[in-house]
Amino acid sequence: MANIENGQVMANNKGELFTIIQVDDKAKTAILKSEETGFTRNYSFPTLKDKRRFTFIQSPEEVAPIMDLDNPISEQEAEEFGMVTGEEALEQAVTVPEEAGEESHKSRITITYKGVTKSPKEWGEEFNLNPKYIRLQLRKGKSPEEIFGE
């Protein structure tokens, strides 16, 4: 694990740069200042050491540039950053059949009420209820009769 010290530069998972401006070893927190906005925010050591959220860097040049869609990078620049472009990207792409794509968006939860089986979304439309509310009530152990009020 990296030591957390004042002056260290970090990048978050969006590529934004931050500088550690104050460390509290007792509370195991650090205050980071955004290089972009100048705002400061307190983070816990476990959050800062989570590689999915932050990366310690030596210099700002280590941060990969954010892709500008108006000025795409060249194949050579993409290769330097380990990106896949062009024909290689097309070869690696997977085509999802329309039917499979539609099924993946279907609700996995079904509710049978008065002999009719529907998704929470469909029942929500019928009874003018939010589907999230219906799923929450089911998780709480309520029956369809209790949820739909009949």
Image (cartoon, rainbow, N blue to C red):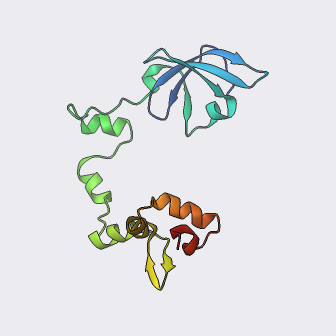
Q: Position of residue 45 (x, y in %)?
A: 68, 29
Q: Position of residue 86 (x, y in %)?
A: 23, 48
Q: Residue at x 31, y 58 (%)?
A: 93
Q: Residue at x 44, y 27 (%)?
A: 63
Please indicate, yes or no, whether residue 1 appears anywhere in the rendered image: no
Would you say 16 lies left or right of 92 here?
Answer: right
Looking at the image, which is closer to me, 4 or 27?
27
Residue 20 picture quarter:
top right
Q: Residue at x 58, y 38 (%)?
A: 51
Q: Is residue 65 above or below residue 89?
A: above
Q: Quadrant of the N terminus?
A: top right
Would you say 89 lies left or right of 137 here?
Answer: left
Would you say 145 lies left or right of 27 here?
Answer: left
Residue 50 picture quarter:
top right
Please indicate, yes or no, whether residue 18 appears anywhere in the rendered image: yes
Looking at the image, which is closer to me, 58 or 147?
147
Q: Residue furthest bottom?
A: 115
Q: Position of residue 135 (x, y in %)?
A: 53, 63
